[in-house]
Image (cartoon, grey):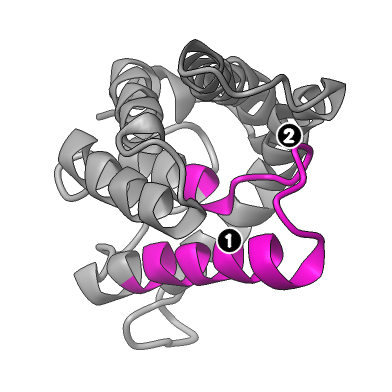
Amino acid sequence: MIMRQGQQLLLPASPLFIWGSLIAAMVLNIVQNVGLWGRAAWSPDLVAVALLFWVVHQPMRVGIATAFLFGLMMDVHQGSLLGQHAFAYSLLGFMALAVHRRLLWFGLLSQALQVLPLFATTHAVELAVRMLVGDGFPGFGVLLSPLLEALLWPLASLLLLIPQKRAPEPDANRPL
């Protein structure tokens, strides 16, 4: 793949870091859902942000099966209909695989605008499944969640790319 002008050459992502960051996102989701403000409809889904990031940046290591697995874990955690998050995360993984090559050509703010529809579709699927089984409408705060996730995208991108941007052996004479 041809790189953009000024784009930094990245080191390979460590599988341990990938899985650690996904598990950390799951733990942060649990903490925010249980401890901070409960299961508020407006709270961002950090697992969806991390999954989308890794499916876009490492599609050979993190894909639809990983999204399905984390969706099942989220269903068990929240006590929701088994498969609700799994279906939504799998759809998110599929959409991310469809746009991952094009998405990486843009800057972080443009990427945030382009992942907003992906997050909105994921939440719409979750909401549709919830309402099909007879659960009530959680309120219009649910519209805020995809916006918060899109706003978190640049921050997540910067944080999750830090280990890949460092030089393997820093040297003053080496340009990379």
Residue 170 horizontal side relative to residue 44, left or right: left
Residue 104 horizontal side relative to residue 55, left or right: right
Is residue 13 visible in the rendered structure shown here?
yes
Q: Considering depth in this image, is 101 or 143 the residue closer to the camera?
A: 143
Write down the region rendered in magenta. Answer: 20-49
Which residue is the site of mark 1?
29
Reply above or below: 41 against 169.
Answer: above
Q: Amino acid at mark 2?
A: Ser
Q: Residue furthest front?
A: 134
Tell me if mark 2 has few (under 14), some (14-19) or many (20+) residues whose alpha carbon lies within 10 angstroms of its own: many
- SS class of the residue under badge 2? helix
Could you say where residue 83 lies in the image, as x and y percent from the top left? 30, 34
Which residue shows up at 44% across the image and 59% down it? 77
Which residue shows up at 39% across the image and 62% down it? 22
- SS class of the residue under badge 1? helix
Q: Amino acid at mark 1?
A: Asn
Q: Quadrant of the N terminus?
A: top left
Determine the CA span between mark 1 and mark 2.
Answer: 13 Å
Could you say where residue 149 lies in the image, as x and y percent from the top left? 68, 39
Reply above or below: 20 against 152.
Answer: below
Quarter-wise, where is residue 117 in the image? Answer: top right
Which residue shows up at 77% across the image and 38% down it? 148
Is residue 7 visible in the rendered structure shown here?
no
Quarter-wise, where is residue 28 in the image? Answer: bottom right
Q: Is residue 138 magenta?
A: no
Q: Considering depth in this image, is 67 or 127 the residue closer to the camera?
A: 127
The circle drawn on residue 145 is: 2
The circle drawn on residue 94 is: none
